[in-house]
Amino acid sequence: MLKGADDAVLEQEDSASRRGEMTSWDINDIKLPQDVRQIDWFQEWPDSYVKHIYSSEDKNAQRHHSSWAMRNTNNHNSRILKKSCLGVLVCSNDCLTLDGRKIYLRPAICDKARQKQQRKCCPNCNGPLQLLSCRGHGGYPVTNFWRHEGKFIFFQSKGAHDHPRPETKLEAEARRSIQKAQTAFSPSSPRLKRIREVESLPGATPTREAPLLLSKPDAYPQPVNFGGHVSKSSREPMLGSCSGRTPFPRAAGEDEGSGELPTWSRIPSLGRTPIARRPCWSPAIPPCSAPSPRHCAHPSSQHVLPVMKGGQGPFRPNAGPSGDGSPPASSGSCLHPPPYPAPQGGPCPMASGAHHHRQLLAPPRGKQGDGGEGGRHMGLSYCRDDMFFNLYPLR
DNA sequence: AGATGCGGGGCGA
DNA sequence: TCGCCCCGCATCT
């Protein structure tokens, strides 16, 4: 009969009404839609004024995850969790790695950890790091709201990020673990001293530097000019006492007075600038021990990202620059081969921003990854061990 | 150690 | 009053 066609029409209308249903609510509404029939896949990079309804089973939604560095903000409403964006940590030298990447580090969420982090130096050029504050919501940081209602988790984002994307949480964690490994082999480390002694012997070769986990600005769609220069005027005060060496002269201050500023640095200064209220950290900062810029990461051998689940990860490919994606038609049970050659020495995908759009679920910690999200995965430790031995080959 | 969540409280519009 | 922020604390990984 015509039932099929009718159904199709009805389905379309239904879908349209669902769309309306999906966007007609506000996170502050007393009552949120309860007859939601279509839930969204978790969005890793929510941007602009978007709303999503996730399943309460969604682990990432449960944890209020975001690949933006979002910190908890007290809105004095225990029913609605509010988070605001911390921006991105950039190199004040605007340096580029050998493979043309910019430094977009993920600000630590913890205040103290962030202070510590800002006292450190650019892992690429040893220059000072600067926090690019997010001011994408009327001069204030972009805010994300989470609200659990019954079987759903409602998400709403307010504001459009006016800065590049930082590393993902996983990349930042991986980088930290690498830095820890480096610390273990720091100049003061007895083991490294011994290695150095051996290296100082005729014929010895220097050890390799640890990899950098950097974002590649053009690896995924960025807001206009996000891959461009960083406006000093939009930055936090420079922190730390880094050498500020600029192994890449082009990047060292060329942006001053040159041409167009990136859109995210052209935010008109408001009467009230949140940045001004933030503290200035002590200038008395110990010299850093960042690696030499001459040993930048190599894209094919040293960018390492912990492997997450295969094609079943809850982070779906983003459809556009805003990070919005459409719910897929199926759960995608197949494992997609990586779109890049496997890195040397192991199955770990690289941490390059080039693969942000394929970001998958974090490795299960504790109970995470059980149940509906179950699937094969390789533990972070596997990758870390693997890369550790790649970085520090035992001789 | 760091991420995360909660709550108290200050400040400015 | 509202929105934003800082801070301390507790819990978890």
Image (tube, coloured by chain):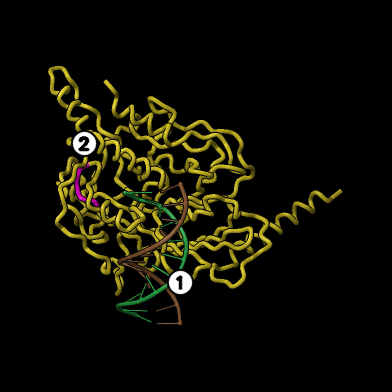
Chain colours: A yellow, B green, C brown
Residue at the image position 41 percent from the left and 57 percent from the top: A70
Image height of A121 relative to A54, above or below: above
Q: Chain of mark 1?
A: A
Looking at the image, is A226 positioned above or below residue A135?
above
N-terminal of the pair, mark 2 or mark 1, is: 1
Name the residue that disc number 2 marks: A186
Which span of residues is magenta-colored?
A125-129
Residues beneath discs 2 and 1 located on the same chain: yes
Q: Eyeballing the image, is A366 above or below A142? A: above
Q: Residues within 10 Å of mark 1 (few under 14, many from 20)?
A: few
Q: Is residue A235 visible?
A: yes
Where residue A302 appears, x then y in whole percent? 33, 32
Q: Position of residue A325 (x, y in %)?
A: 54, 50
Identified by mark 1, the residue type is His
Q: Which mark is residue A250?
A: none
Q: Is residue A368 left or right of residue A384?
A: right
What residue sits 17% from the left and 27% below the top? A196
A280 shown above or below A179: below
Secondary structure that dominates the magenta span = loop
Is residue A263 among the parts visible in the rendering?
no
**Front position in the image: A325 or A242:** A242
Tell me residue A115's x, y (percent): 26, 56
The residue that label 1 is drawn on is A76
Of the 4 image quadrants, the one containing the C terminus of chain A is: top left
**How many numbered discs?**
2
For label 2, the crowd category at 10 Å Cα-Cα, with few meaning under 14, some 14 to 19 and many 20 or more, is: some
A81 sits to left or right of C5: right
Q: Who is closer to the viewer here, A321 or A168?
A: A168
Front residue of A142/A367: it is A367
Picture residue at 14% right of the left edge, 56% below the top: A284
